[in-house]
Image: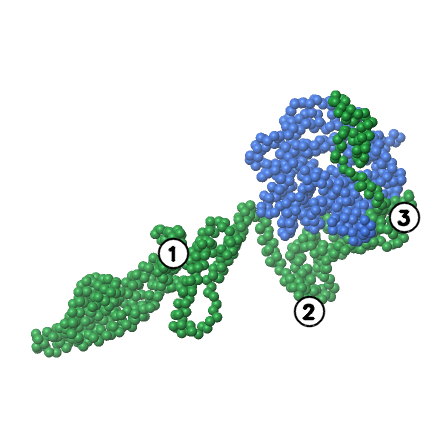
Amino acid sequence: MAAQQSLPNTQAPLDVYGGDEVSALVLDAGYCHTRAGFAGEDVPKSVLPSFYGSLKTSNPDSTTTTYREIFGDECLYPRADFEVKNYMSRSESVVEDWDAATKLWEHMLISRLQPDRESPPIIRSSAKEGTADGEGDVAMEDVEVQEKPLAENPLLMTEAPWNSGKAREKAIEIAMENWGCPAFWMTRTPVCAAFAAGKASALVIDVGGANTSVTAIHDGMILKRSIQKSQIGGLWLSQQIRTMWDNNEPKVNVVPYFMIENKTPVDAGAPAQARLRKYPFEITSSYRAYEEERLLTEFKESVVEVWRGPGRYLNPGNEELVKTQPGRVFEMPDGWNQMWREQRYRVSEGMWDENAALPNPDGNAKAQTIPEMIKACLNAVDVDLRPNLLGNVVVTGGTSLLNGFNDRLNNELMAMHPGMKIKLHAAGLTTERRFGAWIGGSILASLGTFHQMWISRKEYEENGVGIVEKRCK
Amino acid sequence: MASHDIRDVLNLPSDNAGPRPNKKQKTSAARPNLKGLAREVQSLGGDNPIAIVPEIATFKKRRFGSRKPAARWDMSPFRNSARSDQSLLLRHWRKETEDQSRATSQPQSDGQTPGDSGMEGTKKTDVTEDSGFAKFNVQVDVPQYSEDQYASNLVNDDWTKDETDYLFELAKDFDLRWPLIWDRYEYSPQLPEDMKEENEADGTDPSIALIPAPKSRTMEDLKKRYYEVAAKMMAVQKPVQYMTQAEFSLHETMANFNPASELARKKFAQDSLSRSTDEAREEEQLLIEVRRIVARQQKLNQDRQDLYRRLDFPPTEQDITSFKSSAGLSTLLQNLATADRSKKRKPILDTNGANTPGSAQPSAHPNSTPVTESRRESIAASTGGHRDSIGGGERPERPTKKGSQQQQQQQERRKLTEQEEKIYGVSHHDRLPSGPTFRYERINKILTTKSNAQHQRITNTLAELDIPSRLTMPTRNVVEGMEKLLNSIGVLLEIRKLSDKIDAEIRVEQAKNTDRKKPTGIAASGSEPANTSAEGSSESMSAKPSETMNLTNGEKVGSSSTDKSNGEDRPASKPVTDKDINGTEKHELINGNEPENPAQDKAETSEDKNTRPQSSGGHKRSASVLSGASDDKSAKRLKK
């Protein structure tokens, strides 16, 4: 035992894992959720919706109104003058509102992940967080006053592959200036997802909330020409479901949970018998939309299924076959319920077949379907890499958890490239699929060989924000 | 609750009527070791002790005995020497070593966090350890060149120096990973220096990356330039003749990089990627087929080798001078034949017995498929020497004098019916020349063995018959027919010659006859017989060339001309000529030898001899033909 203890670090066994943790933090921001946690762990400690509440408070003594941001899903409940906003841009999945982003990230990285300190603002906020006084979390307006909160933790952030240079510079600025991180690094989500699957080279198919992207990774670097992005993701699927509900006979009335006070069970198809809850204040449409999205997510998780193939769902015979299969019942919050059979395949088919997509205000382009994206991605990559990429297809993203998604993807790939060895790597655990990019970042930031990569504080001070472009290629 | 209580509740008779304290003493005395269990649990067992509880007393004792204070962990700072800047001081948890812990335990006060103490420690000592991972930092060696070197060696019309620099920068940045270099290659040449930097900074972001590159470089272009420069710089630093083997081969590889072939290869790869399902399947099947064929070929080769080894006669150490004479050679032949027979038979019998030629390697020939089985049989058969295989008219058939085993073997094989033999071209021969022969050669042989004149005649006859002398399709039947035809043409020519000769003789004799008659009948004409004889001889002499002429002209014409000269159709009426000849022969015998006739005869026979040395004489031949039978014996008889 003593011999073991005296083993110097340089001789410590590195071959097994190669990890050398330096208590780095990993932050992975997405449109639907933002994930933060410690490097080396297998799930993010803190997962919050990227939606945040904005509470309008009009000061009684003056006419000015101030907005107070509150973060965390536990405080997103019906309130007066309460708007739900998102700091990310839906079309791009990149940060749009930097102020809110900074606050939300601070909330996650500092108040949720850091130990309590003696400095009063953090004490206050963490104390408030625990209390159930209806106020929820408050933003830390005076975070700059205190000493730099993350002075001991290197920070690794992920970004969308199409993130702009300006946004990257802004990110390093916040990390260095506001939080005082000793080191910083920025990496792309597909790279991280590939790392999470244990691959340095992979074709990453990331079916997320707001976007779907197909990216080729070579040796831990993205191939920029191969980046394909489309709107076909979780929100697009929600839109399809809404269209289906609108066209349903009878039309499905979307009433989110918070509006229901009580309900009585009814037969399938019978009108709902529920009493709605009355609020003394007006519920904003943004909050309602947020709640409806949650309902739609539940529908997606429990009912929607992907036609597994072979062939397209619209091919003759397939729909008839599905009609003979048992359907799934979904009960709305107000008690109305119906059996969904062939429709549940139909809503997701637009991901694969642009002709099958239901009418959508955003429009459905052929180039947006997943097979077309894969095709375009592979065509933008050197021929020599293609077989390797097809043998290392990494599927990640929450929407890829749809039933039958992997089977269909496999079928489509086989149809596209017959005779090629195609292997899908889709994590079996739900968390690993949802937090793929974060897990990859966690692995990366805890590697001993990664120490030489960090952009140190001194380098930042010498080179300015431009260093992130030079280093994080 | 003890067992008594349960028994009490269930109204069971208490077998142990003793009072409780009494029993308790008993149990405690009986089981002092069961420390891990609560008293109540123990008593549940009643009189029967609980057996499943392990005895763990020693374990616990030792654990407490050798207890050490918990190991101290320390948040120790370290640097990574692989970093370009050494300012970054990262910290990780490490077990404190003995002296460290002593050193740090003193200044460490209660309120301080381990992290703070670590910071203090580094400030004091400033000897921070290096990360163990620094050694994994490996960099690619990218060739460097100076301005002068570029100007003297590396100037290229297609590449500016700026762009070459840019390429080498990328190569260094991406550690020569060409897909990445090509992917990120965005060179914009005309921009001034400051603009370019700005552009490059933006260039990495894909949203603005749509600025079209002035010259789109393929990966092959980039590689070609890089290898060109690298090879030249290598040669500059170390002349080619001084390079080591490895260096030279590297230099050669780089200098001979061929972008065109590389592009062609990629095109092939692309095509193979975009195959349809059917094509892919077909290719797969073809591959399997090829593999099978190759495997079969190997097996066959092995079998063949085996066979050769068997057939190979042993090398001899004896003196070969005795075999140098012709007599010696014939004895050698005899010896070999007997040796061969004795040697051959044995392996044949062996193989027949085992039913496989490779019985020496049984594992190599698993009796897998009927196909291989049948082939093996055919191999066995060919070892046995019945090469009755397909298509060969000249394949030898084994002489019938064979071992009974052989016969049996033959019978075991499938007998072909007459029809099948015809279809498959199976033929049986008594003996064959060794080695393959061509059928048309057989035809040629008949012709070439003849003299030139005769050859000419035969070809003329063939031309008359509208038969080409060279067969276009020498199948077996055709060849046989041709042989027959040629034979009969030869016979025909013989007969013609003979008949001509006889005609001439007849005429001479007739002339003599008339001459003889004249002096007896017409005394006045004394000079006439000489005249007529001269005439006759001249006639016969003239008839000869005309006849040969006719022969060359063709049978029909020739026959007509002979008709004219002789008034007799010979080929049409053979029996008549037969009689005629017989008559003339008799006539000859009667008349005795004439001075002219023998001379002619001799000339004829000598000619015959010249033309056909193997035949005994023109008469014999013709006689045999004339008699209508192709038997030599009958001809001889006839002559007698």
The residue at which mark 2 appears reads as B242
| Chain for disc number 1 | B
Q: Which residue is mark 3?
A: B105
The residue under label 1 is B404
- Give the colour of chain B: green
Shown colour of chain A: blue
Could you tell me how far apart the alpha carbons at marks 3 and 1 are, in whole angstroms? Answer: 106 Å
* Depth check, front residue: B431 or B148: B431
Marks 3/2 same chain: yes
Residue B327 at x, y = what percent?
Answer: 38, 72
| Distance of label 2 from label 1 (alpha carbons) | 76 Å
Report helix, strand or loop for mark 1.
Answer: helix
Secondary structure at numbered mark 3: helix
On the image, which quarter does residue A319 sit in? top right
Would you call the spot at circle 2 few (<14 residues within 10 Å), some (14-19), or many (20 or more)? few
Amino acid on which the number 2 mark rests in the picture = Tyr
- Label 3 or label 1, whichever comes before in sequence order: 3
Q: Is residue A431 left or right of residue A459?
A: left
